[in-house]
Image (tube, rainbow, N blue to C red):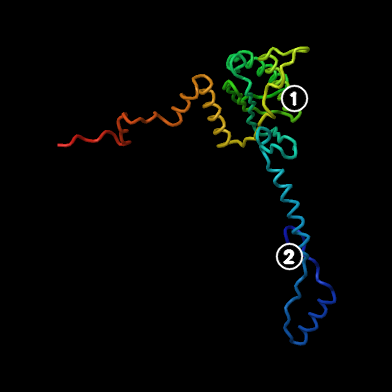
Amino acid sequence: MGTFDGEPAPAIAESECANLAAHQSNGTKQHCPRATIDYSEFMQLSLFARDLNAELVRTEHGGAVRRGRRKLERPVSVRRPMHLVLTSQRARGPWSLRKHEHAVRNALRTMARRFGIRIYDFANVGTHLHLLVRARRRDSFQAFLRSFAGLIARRVTGARRGKPCGRFFDAIAWSRVVSWGRDYLGVRHYVFRNQIEGAEGANVRRALEEGPVRTRHAQPPLSRAGPRPASH
């Protein structure tokens, strides 16, 4: 019996099969009657499945993603790593995260050990933090994120009970589920470039990514094959 998207095709009525057998016995050729399928039902299912599929393949959350739209649950994977970014526009001057590098690393180490989070990579850029992590359970990741962000805010601003300093980190932390392989290596390299920017500055990172800056007085670059031979 034929199928349509995994569903068995509707059965042919017995009366129609009997009529078909009678015509064949009389020597009259007639094509088998085609079963009627209500495609409107499949169209309705596909419309609902489209929204469901978009929700299932969603890997990003927080930051500017879906800002001003309906809140959805953060995608968390326990089998794949996650790229996490915490940003603070208030982290400047004495509140710069670079000035509190030791406290940030201690807080990261403590919270990761408490909630069973594996840290693959980390970068402190001053105004934001990049983490590549993997959680064993969804609730552990959520608890780690809340506790780590709160501890950093208290260590940097000196806030305590009776002396609040307001919200330190911007909006909701951004996260993305990372696939193993090329995606994972690309994120590791991206975090490494942010480590260079945090330690040496944005200009050094830009120079490494784009090469030396060309000016009007600079000599023309040499070809890849080597210098040009002298003319005779």
5 or 166, nearer to the observer: 166
Q: Residue 208's quadrant in the figure? A: top left
Mark 2 sits on what residue?
Answer: 2
**Of all residues shown, which one is farthest toward the bottom?**
26
Query: In the rendering, at what x and y percent does residue 175 appear?
Result: 66, 32
Q: Quadrant of residue 66?
A: top right
Residue found at x 37% / y 31%: 214
- Kind of residue indicated by mark 2: Gly
User: For mark 1, what is the residue?
Assistant: 143
Dot 2 falls on a residue whose secondary structure is: loop
Q: Check disc 1 and report its element: helix, strand or loop.
A: helix
Residue pictured at 83% horizontal, 78% vertical: 18
In this view, the mark in front (1 or 2): 1
Residue 131 position in % (x across, y down): 62, 26
Q: Nearer the viewer, residue 100 or 137?
A: 100
Q: Position of residue 134 (x, y in %)?
A: 66, 28
Q: Quadrant of residue 127?
A: top right
**Is 88 positioned to the left or the right of 12 in the image?**
left
**Amino acid type, mark 1:** Ala
